[in-house]
Amino acid sequence: MKEITLGIDIGGTNTVFGAVDLEGKCYFEGRIRTQDFKSFTEFVAELRFAIDKHIGTLDFSHQILGIGVGAPNGNFYTGSLDLAPNLPWKGKVEVAKEFKAQFDLPVWVTNDAKAAAIGEMMYGAAKGMRDFLVITLGTGLGSGFVVNGNLIYGHDGFAGEFGHVIVSHDGRECGCGRHGCLETYASATGIKRTVYKQLADSLKPSSLRSVSFDLLSADMISKAAEAGDEVAIQAFEYTGQILGSKLADVVHIFSPEAIILFGGLAKAGELILAPVKHHMELNLLPIFRNKVKVLPSGIHGSNAAVLGAAALAWKELGFSVK
Amino acid sequence: MKEITLGIDIGGTNTVFGAVDLEGKCYFEGRIRTQDFKSFTEFVAELRFAIDKHIGTLDFSHQILGIGVGAPNGNFYTGSLDLAPNLPWKGKVEVAKEFKAQFDLPVWVTNDAKAAAIGEMMYGAAKGMRDFLVITLGTGLGSGFVVNGNLIYGHDGFAGEFGHVIVSHDGRECGCGRHGCLETYASATGIKRTVYKQLADSLKPSSLRSVSFDLLSADMISKAAEAGDEVAIQAFEYTGQILGSKLADVVHIFSPEAIILFGGLAKAGELILAPVKHHMELNLLPIFRNKVKVLPSGIHGSNAAVLGAAALAWKELGFSVK
C-alpha cells in the first residue's frame, strides 16, 4: 500500500492540486480556475470531481491519509479564510469544514507562506533544520517562521505578517491602507516600484524605459540586470538593502540557522541573494555574523505550492522525513 | 517532603539567590557581591557557602531538585556565559559545569530576560498563556519571546536580542558599537537620553534641569512626570512612540496574546504602558487591533529575578503550575 496526501493550493487565478507521498514524490497534478466559481461549495465539488479523475488513474494500492490546503489568509486554528483579497468568495469561508464534508478526510488549512515553510522543512532547503525563516517574495511578501521544528501560528493563527513590518512611516502606500510596509519594497511588486522610482529619479538609459508598469515583471527586471542594465542592477541592490536590513532585525529576535527566499522574485538567484546577504550582515551584532545562511528555495518545479500543502498534512499526521 | 528549586540571578553588582517551591513561594533569599570574586570558581564556592547557611535554617523535609541561573548573555544550550559585559570574569564562563561540580544538582542557565519570561509564565502576568512576549526595560532592553508555551532560544541559544533591532540607522550610539538600536531609546538609559535631548532642544522649565546625567534615574523621571513636569511626560510619550511602533512590528510576526513590560522603567506603570499601547495600536493591521494585551509584570517584590530563575528549573524539570 502506498500512502499519499493531497496538497491543494488555492490561488487568485488557479487552484493547483496534487497527490504526494512522504518522500515528496508527486503522483499527479492538476488545476481548476478559482475564479470560475461563485460559491465555495461549487468550487469544492468541482475540485472533488477533478481530483477523482486523477485518482482513477492510480492503482488501488494508494491510500489518501489527509488533505493540506494553502490559501491566502488561511487560518490553521479555525480552518477558515478570513477576508481573503483576490478570491471570489467574500466574508468567512469555512475551508476545512467544506473539504471534510466533500472528501471525508482530515483537513488542515494554512496560508501559502506557512505551507511553503513546511514544504522547505520536509522536502527543501530546510531539511533537518529546526529553526529557520521562509520569506516568500511574490506579489506581496509572506513569511513562515519555524522555531524548534514548529511553525509560529501565534495566539489566533494570524502570525507571520512580516510583509507588514514598517520600513518607513512616510514610505510607499501599501494595499493594507498604511504606508511603508516591507512588502511595498521587497516583493515582485516592490522591485517594480523601485525600478519606476529610479527611472523617474535618474536619466540613466535602461531597456526598462520601454515597458509599462502594468507589463513590467520581476522576471524582466532579472533579465535586464543579467544583461547589465544599471537601473535593474540598482533595483536589486536597493531591494536587498531594505530586505537585508529587516532580516537582520529578525535574526536578532530568532537567531535562525537559515533564511530561505521563496517565490517569484527569489528566482532571480544571486541577483537578490547577494545584496540581501550583504546588507543583512552589515546590520548584525557580532555574535550573529557569518552564521545565518541565506538560501534559495530547495523545492524546484511548478509543484512547490502543492508540495508545501501536502507537507502540512504529513506534518500534522505526525510523519517526518528521515 | 517539600520540593524546591534554587533560583540564582547573577547581576553586575549583586548575585541574588533564593529557594522557591512550585507555587512560587520563596523560602529564603540572600545575596553576595558579584564583583568581590576574581575567579568564577571562588564565586561559586562562596555562593555555595551562603546558600548552605540558609538551607541550614530549613527543616529536613525540603528537597532541592535543581538550579536555575539567570545571567547576562547566559546561553541555555551551552550552559555558559559568553562575553558578558559588567561581569568580573572575562571570556567564556562555564556556569552550568561549575555549578554542577559544586552543588551536584541539575543546572539550567539562561539570560535574565528569558528567565523573566518563564517567571511570568509560571507565576506572573502570563499564567496560562502560551504565546506572549516579555520585554525587560532596565539598563538595556531584553526580551523573552514565548511561542506555544516554549521560549525561543534560536538555533544557537542567542535569540531574543530585540534590544538591538534598528530604529534608525543614523540614530543614537549604542553600547554594541552600532547606531539606532531600540534599547538606546526604550530602556531606563534610553529615557534618560530622551530627557536630556529635550532639555537641549526646548526651553521648557523642568525639575530635571537640576540633575546631572549620571544621577538621573528612570524613577526620578517617573516622579517628575507624576508631578506634571512636561519634559518628563514628553519623554514617556516619545519612548512609548518608539517602543510601541516596534512592538507593532513583532505583533505582525508573532500575533501574541500579550506583551508584558518588566523591569525598572516598566515600574512607571501607566506612564509608559499608555503611550506604548497607543502607538502600538496605531501601527497594527486591522486583524491585530484591540486584541493584544499590554500588561505590567505580574511578579512583585524584590525577588522577581530569583523567581524567574527558579521557574526555569521547574519548567525544565517538567513541572507546570496548575
Image (cartoon, coloured by chain):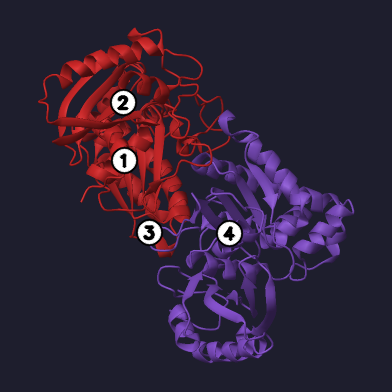
Chain colours: A purple, B red
Q: Is residue A54 left or right of residue A168?
A: right
Which mark's residue is nearer the viewer, 1 or 3? Answer: 1
| Residue B9 image label | 2
Q: Could you classify mark 3 by the number of other residues whose Cα lies within 10 Å: few (under 14), some (14-19), or many (20 or more)? A: many
Using the image, determine if residue A238 lies above or below residue A103. Answer: above
Which mark's residue is nearer the viewer, 2 or 1? Answer: 1
Counting from the top left corner in percent of width and height, residue A15 is at 62, 80
**Residue B164 visible somewhere in the drawing:** yes
Using the image, determine if residue B50 lies above or below residue B161. Answer: above
The Cα–Cα distance between marks 1 and 3, rounded to whole angstroms, is 25 Å
Residue type at numbered disc 3: His
Question: Which one is nearer the viewer's eye here, A40 or A214?
Answer: A40
Q: Secondary structure at mark 2?
A: strand
The Cα–Cα distance between marks 2 and 1, rounded to whole angstroms, is 19 Å
Label 1 near label 2: C-beta < 8 Å? no
Location of mark 3 (residue): A155
Q: Secondary structure at mark 4?
A: helix
Location of mark 4 (residue): A117
- The chain that hosts pointer 1 is B
